[in-house]
Amino acid sequence: MLHKISVIGAGNVGATLVQRLAEAELSKYVTVVDILEGIPQGKALDIAESAPVYGYDTRVIGSNTYDVIQDSDIVVVTAGIARKPGMSRDDLLATNTKIVTDVCNNIKKFAPNAMVILVSNPLDAMCHVALQVTGFPSERVFGMAGVLDSARYKSFIAEALDVSVEDIQGFVLGGHGDTMVPLPRYTTIAGIPLADLLDEASINKIVDRARNGGAEIVGYLKTGSAFYAPSASVLEMIESIVKDKKKILPCAVYLKGEYGIEGLYVGVPVKLGKKGIEQVIEIKLTDAEKAQLRHSADAVQELVTSLKTLVPA
Ligand code: APR
């Protein structure tokens, strides 16, 4: 069990994650920080008061100041604004860059040895901000996107085939956006290739729905974006780290030449263990898949280039 996991942002994703972390008992303390007066304190107290019912001994603390994150082992950044209908994740860039810069300055000050997991969007660009502002090694700064995108993809396959979600293995590559690259070729159902069980048109429909999975939820909610599946996805990553399970999960990581990409955060499969990103797994891609990944990386690069005007070097 870790000493402390902290969550910045007590909104939909942050508060749901705090609840999941408390119930999972992965650390002695879970702390949550938000700028809204009373919100992190109230939500933390509410979650703490459900402990006797669930039987967990995680201590949950909410605050408007960063001293509570002191010496955290892991800090998850969910602070920022979420999408409304008609907005792309990229529309959040300027506002969330300012917020994530402020948050990361505090992480650097209070939790200099922490692993930092980004959730705020646009995800890949926010990872760049965090890496630059904290100055932490890139093995300790990464983003949650691929686990969520893959979960959406797998849930649609399970529904189409009417099979257990547990039998589905599959993942997506690329940035967290419309350019993400689902990989039907690497998708199996209890070891059976997806293409043996589902026709091409149905697979294409699922791939498309996964790409637009976030927007589909924003369309329903109207006042915000998804948070149940995002918080569940962060929990899976944290569990792999805390228990040193070394699960292979798609995460937004800083590539140093892998997949022919240099100095850019892109979603690829990695081994996640107690040291953070322990290995980038390079899989063989067809020329078409390589081109899609390159296209996705170019979209991330475009955002990162526009960041230069927002974050002083
Ligand atoms: N410091 C701390 N918290 C902040 C700051 C800041 N500087 N600025 C904003 N926040 C808080 C808000 O007060 C709010 O409580 O971040 C929280 C965000 O919560 P929601 O608006 O409910 O958004 P949520 O759905 O949780 O999404 C958060 O994750 O998935 C991404 O695109 C999503 O960027 C968004 C982020």
Image (cartoon, grey):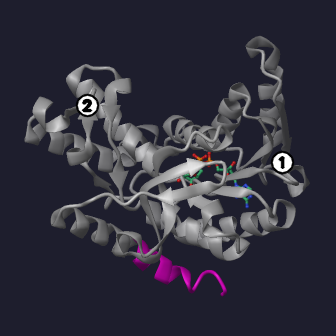
Q: Which label belongs to residue 266?
A: none
Q: Are marks 2 and 1 in contact (CB under 8 Å)?
A: no
Q: Nearer the viewer, mark 2 or mark 1?
A: 2
Few, some or many C-alpha atoms within 10 Å of disc 1 (few <14, some 14-19, many ≥20)? few
The secondary structure type at the circle numbered 2 is: loop
Quadrant location, the N terminus: top right
Which residue has dot 1 on it? 37
Q: Measured from the top left, where is residue 139 in percent x and y?
A: 61, 63
Corner quadrant of residue 128:
bottom right
Q: Mark 1: which secondary structure?
A: loop
- Residue occupying the far top of the picture: 53
Magenta stretch: give its range: 300-313
- The image position of residue 130, as x and y in percent, is 65, 68
Q: Viewed as shown, does residue 3 lie left or right of 244?
A: right
Mark 1 sits near ligand 1, with its Cβ under 8 Å away:
no
Q: CA distance from mark 2 to mark 1?
A: 50 Å
N-term-proximal mark, 2 vs 1: 1
Residue at point 32% right, 49% down? 212
Image position of 16 (left or right of 256): right
Q: Which residue: 31% across, 50% down?
A: 211
* Type of amino acid at the residue the image marks with label 1: Glu
Q: Position of residue 101 (x, y in %)?
A: 69, 70
From the viewer's perspective, is residue 269 above or below residue 294?
A: above
Residue picked out by circle 2: 191
Is 164 located above or below residue 125 in the figure?
Answer: above
Of residues 188 and 10, the one drawn nearer to the viewer in this rendering:
188
Tag 2: amino acid: Gly
In this picture, residue 108 sits left or right of residue 285: right
